[in-house]
Amino acid sequence: MSFIDWSVFAVYFGAVLGFAYYQSRKNVGVEGYFLANRRLPWGAVGLSVMATQASAITFIGTTGQAFDDGMEFIQVYLPQPLVMVLLCVLFVPFFYRAKLYTAYEYLENRFGPHTRSLTAFLFLVSRGLAAGIVLYAPAIVLSVIMGWDERATILIMGAVTIGYTTMGGITAVIWTDVVQMVMMFVGIAVALVILFTTLPAQVDFGDVVYIGGIQEMWSSVDLSWDPTNTYTIWSGMIGGFFLALAYFGTDQSQVQRYLTASSLKQSRLSLIFNAFLKVPMQFFILSIGVLLFVFYHFERPPLVFNSAEVALVQESDLAGEYRRLEEQQGQIHSLRRDATLELLEVRHGGGDTDEIKERIGRYDGQLRGLRQDAKAVVAEVRGSSSNDVNYVFPSYLIKYVPVGILGLMIAVIFAAAMSSLDSELTALSSATVIDFYRRLIKPGATDDHYLLVSKISTLVWGLLACVVALYAGRLGSLIEAVNQVGSLFYGSLLGVFLLAFLVKRSNGTGAFWGLVAGMGSVFVVSVTTDISWLWYNVVGVGVVMVVGTVLSLFTGHSETVVGDLP
Amino acid sequence: MTHSPDLGPPDEDEGRIGIFASWNWLYASVVIYTIIMLVVLYVFTVTLDHGIG
């Protein structure tokens, strides 16, 4: 990066830290630290909700996914506006009016201490390790693409985030999320403009749409019924609905955000804000990927975008094989570029384009085949499969964007990572202190004591995230296992909350065993069937609701929760 | 323990929400917005894609 890029980067860090310090001075006590004394406006809360969901991998991974597969991923986001309405109607009034600190606190009021402890514990385990991945995933990409030291990248990103989150609590987090989300909006707009300007002069907007259409990259709605396919409208609208409801309605990292609003109305408005903005934002992020696909019709892309993997292959016995694939790619890419320019000329002249489109389609197929072959070579050398989807967009940035813009775009990737990590840290800290420490370890202490413990807890969770990130490369299958545990309990956790809200006769016994049965059922479904993971949440919700309701009816409704569990 | 928490004063559920007459109108607009997005994306799919395979 040039001096100008570094300057842009430094200005970003300075602005984030300064703004965090300024805003956090208004906090008072533990309620200020975890809930900003319930005084924030809907706009800030709404942007923070959005920033928490949009991690760095959302920004760089989904663009890479759209480069390979087009816009189909948007189907997973389509039900989110409806989810926001259900949250406003059902979840938010319960949480907000009960003056809670954490979502799990509500479950103790409703089902007893065991259900609260179990759900809060599951949250801490899965989110605690996931916080490390939020740091690790962009750091590994940036270290490969920029040549930075991976450990230094993790530590800088982690130290800055831990610093402002520990000192400023949720107020600092939400206001820095606002800055970071604005940065992401600017980054998305700049990326689209830059991509257009780096296309050949004779290629206009209509041509871009047209070229993308040849390979059906704009295909956003798949009406086919196939539960093994994640990207159909049914998987998206049904499975995606329950996934989003579980995430926004039961995950403390999101619930904590809308509990900071100054009133129930402000809390609801923050979610409605997301209802209107989320899908268009995702549409534009995915469009960057489709534009990259079009851009690489005119510029030759790498066969594999992860340069570290390529370097590994070039030092192996399969270097010759990889070079041969690269040569073939060069020849076919050149033919496709010429055919694409010819197509645009004929199209503008009003001629018949079918034969040229057919030729381009053939070249596209050959290029995709070569990319698969190259990935197979990489997989053989590495001993594990190659997935370079996160490297597509960053490798474009480093090669094609002008000085100054590169610094901005790298700052945007940092912003996306930090805005997710800071929310995880405050959520983890609040669940640790409110659901365990204040309740079970040291009840009845002063507010100052809990505030100090809250800050220490945030610091410890931040350090743990850094340690996980530093060793994530070696943890491999453990991380996969943690992610699987997360997907097992997400839908079931939602089932417990729905049981609490919707089934008046449900009790602690039903909820506890319903949760266990739900998680067990999802595990069985995940190992015995090929259905898409999006449907796991539907299974979890269904089993918890049925088992929880039936058990509650048999064991009877209890007016008191003490001793309600087996 | 009761099923519902203290639901507090109902005043926040009443009155205009910006340009909307009530929360129900705002929620209905979100539902309509979702349907429109779905239709627009479907139209994108069938009109912009002109694949040869």
Image (spheres, coloured by chain):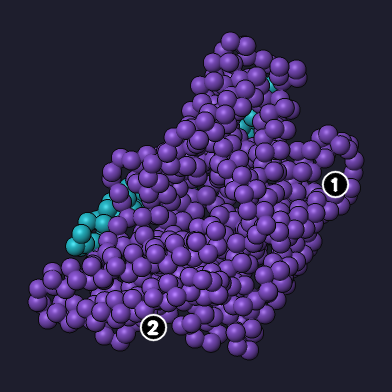
Q: Chain of mark 2?
A: A
Position of the C terminus of chain A by quadrant: top right
Residue A483: % across, % down:
59, 46
Q: Is residue A76 left or right of residue B38?
A: right
**Residue at x 52% of width, y 80% of height:** A398
**What residue is disc 2 on?**
A198
Q: Who's cyan, chain-wise? A: B
* Chain-order first, disc 1 or disc 2: 2
Residue B36 in the image, given as x and y percentages of width and height: 31, 51
* Helix, strand or loop status at disc 1: helix
Question: SS of the residue at dot 2?
Answer: loop
Residue A296 location in percent, x, y? Answer: 36, 76
Q: Is residue A539 visible?
A: yes
Furthest toward the front, the residue is A317
Q: Spot the purple chain and give its letter.
A: A
- Circle 1 residue: A450
